[in-house]
Image (cartoon, rainbow, N blue to C red):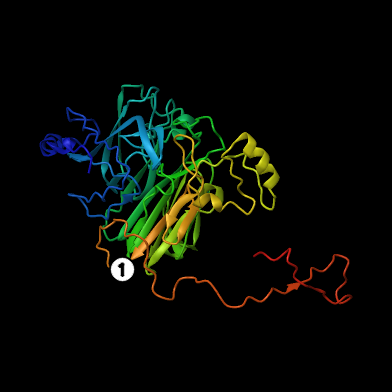
Amino acid sequence: MSLSRRDLVGASSLALLGASAISGRVQAQSIPEAPTTTSNTMQPPLYPTSGPDYQPVVTLNGWTLPWRQNGDWKEFHLVAEPVEREMAPGMIARLWGYNGQSPGPTIEAVEGDKVRIFVTNRLPEHTTIHWHGQLLPSGMDGVGGLNQPHIKPGQTYVYEYQLKKSGTFMYHPHADEMVQMAMGMMGFFVVHPRDPTLHRVDRDFVFLLSSYDIEPGSYVPKVAEMLNFNMWTWNSRVFPGIDPLVIAKDDRVRVRVGNLTMTNHPIHMHGYDFEVTCTDGGWVRPEARWPEVTIDIPVGAMRAYEFDAIYPGDWAIHCHKSHHTMNAMGHDLRTFIGVNKRDFTRKMKRLVSDYMPMGSAGMADMGEMEMPLPENTLPMMTGFGQFGPIEMGGMLSVVKVREGLASGDYKDPGWYQNPPGTVAWEWKGPKPEAIRAATPTPSAKPGSTPARVVKPSPHNSHK
Ligand SMILES: [Cu+2]
């Protein structure tokens, strides 16, 4: 773990000093040091060492922020600062985030906890933090100008409140919001129930949806973009850079997804049906839960769903807007399906000697080809599975359900070994031609003309 844990040294003496710190004012003479990481691999869950027990979450390609106990208060320290995020091997984005990464670390606490969150601003402009979904005093809500003065560069502000309820919340700036969110400033805030048996699961995954517009060859997102984003990310990562969701067979599993992009994302998980159990408004009562295989995550909202992992396998999980499962897609891409490009290619090759015609039979050829790319970008369609190219990018990962995984083991187990006879297979026998029914003409009255059967011709049978 590349976290700085110096902040936890001496925590016990501070706890003694702060034993009477229940007034809501800072009594400690020091700010807890801000742990930081530049790692983009998922850190193991951070189990509680005191207070009520809970099953901690894991943040895909991310981590949970360590805290210190100071009397009655759980103290955290967030630092808003410029960061570098590898979106997938081959592409770095220069973003703004918290404590070394975008998204910021996940904050975890327990219902009823008093939290004191120090926020230091190391950005070149002012910021604030809004605690999306939390029930708190108006002056702690973080809308710059409305609830508090902005936190100027170099300043540290303190937010203090008691966590009124358990559930899933988010944090993000409410200052120059369009720019600061387009630059990647956001994080998860998970509050566990005080009763450790309530809503208990064995594995609990969190990820935030965010989108960026980063031109191939550049590193900084265009911050004034409204719709034409080209990097659709989970925790500021894209396929094949997103961690798999590794699950032991028969685990009870929760997946919490927050959306801080400018559009909705229908997240579809293969292999299972699941129940929607929580929104950023709270837990869904058991009798009001509803089944889904795709859950639409509205803009500025969180959805959590649960399932029992009874089906082993490699199951895709992805946004169902198909252009969101692509990387750095050119928006001026022409459709060439059915076009004979021989003539065009001959002319193009005179201008550009390595020109390659693509797309006349679909675009799957892009998934297989290792083409030269401009600096600092990713192929639109990429990634390989055990059977070939996966031809995707962006918002895609794999749910890997395996027998015999130890609890707490989140290591990628590799590809699923399918039991014999359970993989789709190629038919090698004779293939009879399809018989096509005629389309009735609009003028045909029912029963006036018998339907004509059109013989298949070589032109309309795909080989
Ligand atoms: Cu999407």
> Which one is in front, 116 or 127?
127
Which image quarter is the N terminus in?
Answer: top left
Which residue corresponds to the image point at 44% horizontal and 63% vertical from the top-left? 274
Q: Is residue 321 visible?
A: no
Left or right, residue 286 beside residue 194:
right
> Which one is in front, 29 or 205?
205
Say which quarter of the image contains residue 455: bottom right
Mark 1, residues whose alpha carbon is within 10 Å: few (<14), some, or many (≥20)?
few
Left or right, residue 201 beside residue 185:
left
- In the rendered image, which residue does mark 1 sit on? 403
Residue 206 pos. (x, y %): 37, 50
Q: Secondary structure at mark 1?
A: loop
Vertical order, 451 against 264 (above or below):
below
Residue 363 pos. (x, y %): 58, 51
Left or right, residue 370 beside residue 106:
right
Q: Amino acid at mark 1?
A: Glu
